[in-house]
């Protein structure tokens, strides 16, 4: 039976199910640790299941009865779920929408610095701890709710040493940003890499990603991230290793 995480026993079960899993093993436990009290309706567990339903897409570690899972996710208002098909059957009746590749870097390994427009690169200033709100605004300019959520979560995580975000500044404007938005359990989950539209194709985004991943790896962490199909070639070219796959399933419209 799927139930809300309310007791220490529930928490231990949640953490145990996530242990050792790529991406899910850092994002889900850290979210529960930091936001379990303030957002109690977000985290659920079953005998072999851990769920974070903090948005319209649920993140799922472990497995559950497909019929029960489908009904529960519908009840919670989730339209999609991310899961590992190697261990979990999808919600009954839901449709497979896409594959997310897991890429990463072995702790201690260093990637070569990729090519970039050297004149442009030299003109930019690396900010290792940019203000959280401009970063959130740059990433989600047209989604105020998502922007505010990211701002709040980033402040909470960064104050505890659980996130690291970098930005390349062109004057006072963000030219490019990338971050490790969850750092725990030996992993650093990287996400939200974005370059200003007029500066894309010049290599600065790839170089910033590699530099941050190399720094995390040198500290003994394993950088990991999820990649959409159209970006697989980009990350392969940078030298990251494909470690696995997760699938996104979406609710079938009746």
Image (cartoon, rainbow, N blue to C red):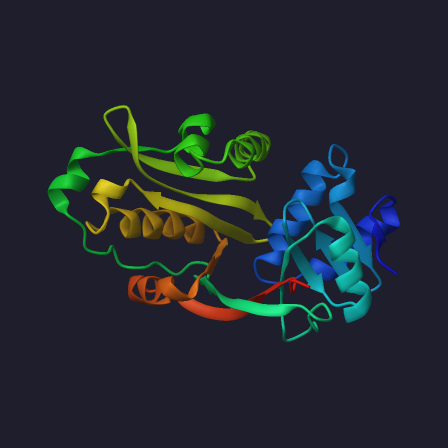
Image point 29% across, 52% down: which residue?
Answer: 206
| Number of residue marks | 0
Q: Is residue 133 left or right of residue 19?
A: left
Which of the two residues, 161 or 13, is positioned nearer the viewer here? 13
Q: Position of residue 108 (x, y in %)?
A: 42, 58
Q: Is residue 172 left or right of residue 145?
A: left
Establish if 74 lies above or below 62.
above
Task: Find residue 59 and report its image quarter.
Answer: bottom right
Establish if 183 lies above or below 171.
below
Q: Position of residue 25 (x, y in %)?
A: 63, 57
Residue at the extreme front of the image, as rendered:
254
Which of the two residues, 72 or 176, is positioned nearer the viewer here? 72
Q: Position of residue 23 (x, y in %)?
A: 57, 57
Residue 240 appears in the picture as rendered = no
Which of the two residues, 48 or 109, is positioned nearer the viewer here? 48
Image point 84% across, 57% down: which residue?
Answer: 2
């Amino acid at each position: 039976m799927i139930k809300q995480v309310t007791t220490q026993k529930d928490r231990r079960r949640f953490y145990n199910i996530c242990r050792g899993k790529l991406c899910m093993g850092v994002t889900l436990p850290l979210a529960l640790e930091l936001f379990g009290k303030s957002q109690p309706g977000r985290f659920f567990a079953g005998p072999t299941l851990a769920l974070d339903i903090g948005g319209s897409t649920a993140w799922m570690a472990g497995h559950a009865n497909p019929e029960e899972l489908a009904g529960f996710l519908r009840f919670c208002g989730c339209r999609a779920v991310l899961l590992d098909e190697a261990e979990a059957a999808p919600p009954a009746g839901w449709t497979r929408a896409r594959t997310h590749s897991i890429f990463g870097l072995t702790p201690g390994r260093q990637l070569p610095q990729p090519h970039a427009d050297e004149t442009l690169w030299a003109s930019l200033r690396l900010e290792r701890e940019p203000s959280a709100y401009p970063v959130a605004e740059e990433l989600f300019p047209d989604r105020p709710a998502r922007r505010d959520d990211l701002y709040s979560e980033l402040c909470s995580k960064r104050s505890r040493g659980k996130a690291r975000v970098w930005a390349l500044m062109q004057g006072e404007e963000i030219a490019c940003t990338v971050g490790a938005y969850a750092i725990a359990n030996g992993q650093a989950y990287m996400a939200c890499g974005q370059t200003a539209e007029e500066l894309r194709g010049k290599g600065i985004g790839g170089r910033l990603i590699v530099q941050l991943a190399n720094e995390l790896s040198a500290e003994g962490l394993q950088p990991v991230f999820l990649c959409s199909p159209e970006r697989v070639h980009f990350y392969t070219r940078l030298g990251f290793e494909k470690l696995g796959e997760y699938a996104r399933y979406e609710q079938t419209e009746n």
